[in-house]
Image (cartoon, grey):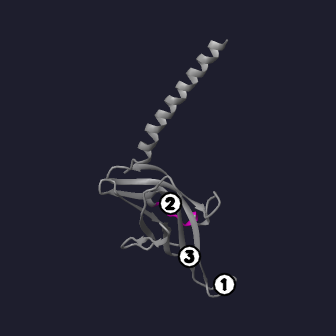
Amino acid sequence: MMNHTKSLNKTFVTLMATLLLVLALVVPAHAATYPDDGDYTVEYSVLHAVNNVTSMLDAYRDTTFYGGKAFLEVSGSGSTQTVTVRFTNDSYITAFEVELGSGYVPATLVSGTSFTYSFPYSDFESLLKVRAYIEIPGPLPGFPDGYSTWREARFSFGTIDEI
């Protein structure tokens, strides 16, 4: 019985060591891999600023733009990733910002559009904090001069597909 237990322990240790070796080789390679230069779509959802539920800002997302996905352009041998999202033309979004580094920075309004914004981003495994400034002209019930506010949310990115 003692030899059987030693044999099981030795087998278990060998299996665990093999598993750790495989993880050590696979995980860093996956984490550091970005798509090749080119154009892609990225699935994303718009989450509430603090809770993992759909944000009200998700209702402003233009689902006809790449099937409701973000557009991703990769250039410079993978060193530059630019994400583009579009909101509906009735969204009343007048500014859009993303949190990069220590604070929010304005996303770039794509030339010739009113509701399409681009921004640099490469960490698709993390949530991205975003905020939009919403202005609804008045008069509105309870808001005779209209309504304006910053609406914060988070983007959660998913599958990246080549176009």
Residue for badge 2: 63
Rate crowding at label 1 as few (under 14), some (14 to 19) or many (20 or more) other CA atoms within 10 Å: few
Q: For residue 50, what is the image quadrant?
A: bottom right
Packing grade of label 2 (10 A; few <14, some 14-19, many >=20) is some
Q: Which of the marked residues, 1 or 2, is nearer the chain's N terminus?
A: 2
Q: Which residue is mark 1?
A: 143
Q: CA distance from mark 1 to mark 3?
A: 14 Å
75 to the left or right of 4: left
Between the C-alphas of marks 1 and 2, the distance is 29 Å
Where are the magenta residues, as a range?
A: 58-64
Q: Nearer the viewer, residue 144 or 104?
A: 104
Quadrant (top left/top right/bottom left/bottom right) for the N terminus = top right
Disc 3 and disc 2: Cα gap in Å? 19 Å
Q: Give the amino acid type for the residue marked by disc 2 in the picture.
A: Thr
**Amino acid beneath label 3:** Ile
**Secondary structure found at label 2:** loop
Residue 134's tag is 3
Which residue sits at x=43%, y=68%? Answer: 117
Q: Secondary structure at mark 1?
A: loop
The residue drawn where x is 52% and y is 25% is 14
134 inside magenta stretch: no
Determine the residue positioned at 51% across, 34% down: 20
* Position of 118 relative to 141 (above/below): above
Does 106 sit above or below residue 19? Answer: below
- Res 120 quadrant in image: bottom left
Mark earlier in primary sequence (1, 3): 3
Residue 52 x/y as whole percent: 63, 57
